[in-house]
Each structure stands twice: as structure tokens, then as C-alpha cells.
């Protein structure tokens, strides 16, 4: 190679080196922009980055709407209280207990609800099951039975003295009344009649006699009606005999004659 060609090559290399040094260095890292594109804002450029997520977390969330109040239900007025009634079934009318505790002595005539009229034989203190109790010994001659009633339980058991003359006259006035027969089954009425007889109350027993009594012009009683009627008459006659100091047969005849006058 001659000297002229070598000089040309050296000159070209020097020019190229000078051009590279004079060009801006940022052009190597800049990317060409596409025509028609908008510059990206800092907010859109940050989407999807951790910094964007933190920024969204710091932004206050919109307040949730308060739940609508539930409609108030109308308060129904309380139903009026129904009167308390007893369960259906035979009612046991309470015997007419004395207003004060009664004292008994030997020889007194007393009435025990389920056994009728008896006589007090004695009052003694006895030991029963390790307890000392004061007992009233009552004998029922017709049934040949002796009953022992604790003095402390005499009133609650229904034990009482004979009705006064005025009290028995009230029972006799009931016999003059009109029969009040309920329109229910006979089995139900029979239970109610038996409960009245066992109450020991002369007025309640007189109600049984009044309802079951039959005059000559009325139909005859059934067998069960006759039995209950005779039991009620027997109780009334026994107490009337003790009051009049006569026997039961005389007292029963007195009641029968009185019923004949009832129309």
C-alpha cells in the first residue's frame, strides 16, 4: 500500500472518532416515540407498582350507606285475662268449717265428712311411730267402727260438731226449693252428688235430696239415683236425730213427711 492510501484511511478514522465524541450520549438510551401517543402521567405510570397499591390503601374509602331502619311492628293490645275456672270434673264443696278451733269432750256428737255422725269416746295421748299425738277416738255405732283423729288435724280433716238448730233449718229451707238439675251426663252428676254427700255440709246434702226427690206424679228414680238419694237422706236423718235427741228412724220419718208438703 502506498503512502497516499494509508493517509486517507487514517483521515477517515479520525473523522469517525470525532463524530462519535460530538453526538449526545442520551440518544443511546432514549426510545423512539410513536406518533399519536400521549405522554404517560405519573399516576398511570404507577399503576400496578407497590407504590400505587400503597397510595390506593391510603385513599379514604367511601362511607357505606347506613342500613335502613326496620319497620316497627304494631304492638297488639294484650288480651283481657280470662277468669280462672276450675277444671272440669266433680266439684267437692268444702264443708262448713267452724270459724274457731273447737274443743271436744267425751260424749259429744260430731260429724266426720265421709262417715257421718259419731260419738266422741275419749281423748288420749298416744305414741305412734315415735311421736306422741293427742287423738280423738270417735265411734260410729251403725258401722261398728272407731276412728282416731289427731286434735291438731281435726279442723283440716273436716271434723265438726253438730249443726245448730238455725243451721239445720237452713238445710230444711233448701228442701223446699225447686230442683236444679244440670243437663249433663248422669255419671258426671252422680259424682257431684257423691262429693256433696261426703262434704258433710247439711246444706249441700239437702241439695242432693231436693234434686233427686220424686213426688207421686213424677217418674220413678233409676237404681243409681235411688241409691244416692237414700244415702243423702240417711246423712240428714242421722244429724237431725242427734240434734233432736231421737233415733234415726224417727228423724227419717220427719224428713219424709216434710218432703210430702213440698210441691
Image (tube, helix red, strand yellow):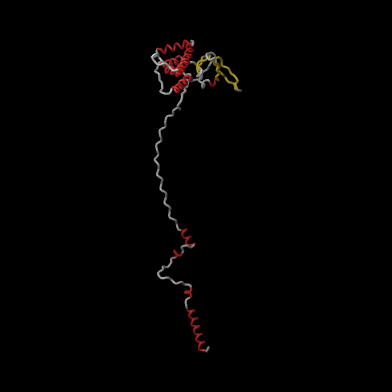
Left or right of 94 in this view: 128: right
Residue shown at 40% from the left, 18% from the top:
179
Q: Residue furthest right?
A: 130
> 65 above or below 104?
below
- Front position in the image: 159 or 140: 140
Residue in the picture at 42% in, 31% down: 82
Residue 146 position, x and y percent, is 55, 16
Decide which of 118, 115 is in the foreground and name it. Answer: 115
Q: Where is residue 99 in the image (x, y as percent from the top left)?
A: 48, 20
Residue 32: give x, y in percent of width and height.
44, 72
Inspect this view and state whether residue 28 appears: yes
> The C terminus appears in which quarter of the rendering?
top left
Residue at image location 58% in from the left, 17% down from the top: 124
Above or below: residue 242 compared with residue 1: above
The mark tally for this picture is: 0
Residue 245 is situated, as x and y percent measured from the top left of the image, at 49, 10
**Residue 98 visible in the picture:** no
Amino acid at each position: 500500500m502506498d503512502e497516499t492510501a494509508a493517509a486517507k484511511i487514517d483521515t477517515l478514522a479520525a473523522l469517525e472518532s470525532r463524530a462519535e465524541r460530538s453526538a449526545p450520549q442520551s440518544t443511546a438510551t432514549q426510545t423512539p416515540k410513536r406518533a399519536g401517543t400521549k405522554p404517560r402521567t405519573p399516576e398511570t405510570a404507577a399503576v400496578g407498582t407497590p407504590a400505587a397499591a400503597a397510595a390506593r390503601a391510603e385513599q379514604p374509602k367511601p362511607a357505606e350507606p347506613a342500613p335502613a331502619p326496620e319497620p316497627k311492628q304494631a304492638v297488639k293490645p294484650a288480651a283481657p285475662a280470662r277468669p280462672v275456672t276450675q277444671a272440669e270434673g266433680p266439684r267437692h264443696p268444702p264443708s262448713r268449717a267452724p270459724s274457731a278451733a273447737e274443743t271436744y269432750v267425751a260424749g259429744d256428737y260430731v260429724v266426720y265428712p265421709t262417715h257421718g255422725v259419731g260419738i266422741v269416746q275419749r281423748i288420749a295421748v298416744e305414741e305412734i311411730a315415735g311421736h306422741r299425738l293427742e287423738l280423738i277416738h270417735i265411734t260410729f255405732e251403725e258401722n261398728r267402727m272407731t276412728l282416731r283423729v289427731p286434735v291438731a288435724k281435726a279442723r283440716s280433716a273436716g271434723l265438726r260438731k253438730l249443726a245448730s238448730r238455725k243451721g239445720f233449718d237452713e238445710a230444711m229451707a233448701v228442701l223446699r226449693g225447686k230442683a236444679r238439675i244440670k243437663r249433663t251426663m248422669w255419671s258426671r252428676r252422680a259424682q257431684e252428688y257423691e262429693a256433696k254427700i261426703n262434704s258433710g255440709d247439711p246444706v249441700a246434702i239437702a241439695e242432693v235430696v231436693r234434686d233427686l226427690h220424686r213426688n207421686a206424679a213424677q217418674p220413678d228414680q233409676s237404681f243409681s239415683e235411688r241409691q244416692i238419694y237414700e244415702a243423702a237422706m240417711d246423712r240428714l236423718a242421722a244429724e237431725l236425730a242427734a240434734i233432736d235427741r231421737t233415733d234415726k228412724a224417727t228423724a227419717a220419718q220427719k224428713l219424709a213427711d216434710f218432703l210430702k208438703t213440698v210441691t
